[in-house]
Image (cartoon, helix red, strand yellow):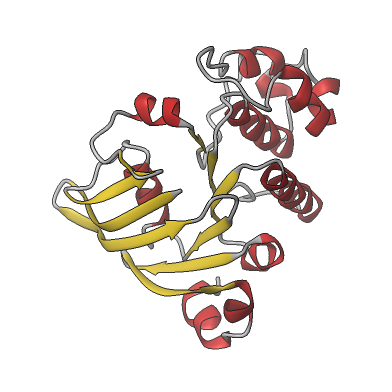
Amino acid sequence: MLKVEDIHTYYGESYVIQGVSLYLEEKEILTLLGRNGAGKTTTLRSIMGLRPPRQGKVFYRDRDITRMNPYEIVRLGIGMVPEDRRIFTGLTVEENLNIAVQSHRTGRWNMQTVRELFPILEQRHHHRGHQLSGGEQQILAIARALMGNPRLLILDEPCEGLAPLIIKLIAETIVNVSHEGVTILLVEQNVEMTLEIAHRHYVIDQGKIIYTGTNEELAGNQEIREKYLSI
């Protein structure tokens, strides 16, 4: 579904992503792991057209999207939940969801099915974004991305700063969304959580992919986990 071929991305003269390649199969949960500053978010921004690579290619379902605008990429069927959630704090839950509807895309997700998946949003539908807890804001951000009926959902650090019980809820949510046929690309620092839900993993360090393996392979590789993933 997604193929990243040898991308090189800069911020000014700062060489951040140094030849990253990865692929993602349909209906897979794939994680991109690494410490802060390793290049995870920049890789996602390169995929979404927010920081296009100077070199290399990004393909979505065999279509070259490397030079597309972010809104064009979203219209193709890629949704993203950014690290800082970016919900509209002055709008209600319902307004946040409605604003993400894409009339040209139809599919599984609408106001009713999103509320069924996330009952807390039904209870809070008249609350404004600033009245929600951190966990509720994260759930709203995921639900809002689903309202665009993406085939691929990219999540950037969805568990950051959340309590263990909420992290468990977010993990269950990701699995439930995957079971509905949505492919998941997950950036996360909570390795234990990703080992419970993902199929494969890439580990990035200093802008380069230094390891790739299945869930079982990463779980059994203590050296990689201690060297590159311990906090």
For this orientation, the residue located farthest to the left is: 13
Q: Is residue 118 visible?
A: no
| Residue 156 as seen in the image, left or right of residue 114 | left
Viewer-proximal residue among 224 and 196: 196
Q: Residue at x 58, y 55 (%)?
A: 28
| Residue 104 as seen in the image, left or right of residue 146 | left
Viewer-proximal residue among 112 and 225: 112
Viewer-proximal residue among 18 and 152: 152
| Residue 180 as seen in the image, left or right of residue 74 | right
Residue 15: x and y in percent read 20, 57
Residue 132: x and y in percent read 73, 27
Q: Is residue 113 above or below residue 35?
A: above
Q: Residue at x 81, y 52 (%)?
A: 165
Q: Quadrant of the C terminus?
A: bottom right
Q: Is residue 99 above or below residue 121?
A: above
Viewer-proximal residue among 121 and 61: 61
Residue 212: x and y in percent read 46, 73
| Residue 168 as seen in the image, left or right of residue 193 | right
